[in-house]
Amino acid sequence: MKKLFSIFLITVFISVSAQDKPVFWNEIQEFKTLNVKTPPPKNAILLLGSSSFTMWKDVDRYFPEYLLINRGFGGSSLYDLNFYSDELLAPYAPRQIIIYCGENDFAGNENLKPKEVFNRYKNFYSEIRKYYPNIPVAYVSIKLSPSREHLWPKFIATNAMIKKFMDRKPNAEYIDITKAMNGPNGKVREDLFLEDMLHMKAEGYQIWQKEMAPYLRKP
């Protein structure tokens, strides 16, 4: 009877522990496992952010002359990047960090104000500087996903604040991909997106490659 009770307690403990894991805990553990199996190269360009980076599986093919480490995890927000800042920054010794994140902050809480998301970005930028005071950091602007058109005003306002912030910082760049994703009529090209009108087709990433390339730092 005691043995059965002990097994019951262990089962409850495991269940509770699993439920207590923070969001994206599994993804971060996968990064840790990957880092053990294949130690990340030094002096690479580190990509951090949400699904637009996660789904860019063949990003190396777009930038064959660069060494890249992709640590995007789908659905993440700037809040999550701050929460896991140690795990996302400490294991690497990058030459440059490029960030795409912020879209999901508003998607997860539409009551958030642009200033609040901007402050999340400023905090994460400060975390980066604790580890890497002088390396180049670039922020890719929040794209205007058609499925989130009702949030565009907040995206645009947040982009403007982050651009102003980055323009004032040394070794910091703001990469605007929004204009390049518009058609001749000045409207967002929906043909660049998958059926969900959120994630991009290869044509969208081709535009990103063109806009990002001038900002990537070679050794």
Image (spheres, grey):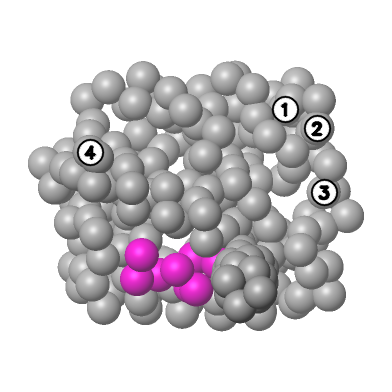
Q: CA distance from mark 2 to mark 3?
A: 10 Å
Q: Which residue is mark 3?
A: 148
Q: Earlier in the sequence, mark 2 or mark 3?
A: 3
Q: Residue 164 location, x and y as percent?
A: 50, 70
* Residue corresponding to mark 4: 38
What's the mark number on residue 196?
2
Q: Which mark is residue 193?
A: 1
Within 10 Å of the Cα at label 4, are there few (<14), some (14-19), or many (20+) other Cα atoms?
few
| Residue 13 shows in the view | no
Q: Residue at x 26, y 78 (%)?
A: 130
| Side (left or right) of 175 relative to 23 | left
What element does badge 1 sit on?
A: loop
Magenta stretch in the rendered image: 78-87
Q: CA distance from mark 1 to mark 2?
A: 7 Å
Of the image marks 1 and 3, the number of the one nearer the N terminus: 3
Tell us which disc is closer to us: 4 or 3. Answer: 4
Q: Is residue 71 above or below residue 61?
A: below
Residue nearer the viewer, 168 or 39: 39
Residue 149 rendering spot, x and y as whole percentages? 85, 48
Q: CA distance from mark 4 to mark 2?
A: 33 Å
Residue 111 located within the stretch drawn in magenta = no
Q: Could you give the CA–CA distance between mark 4 and mark 3, rounded to whole angstroms?
A: 37 Å
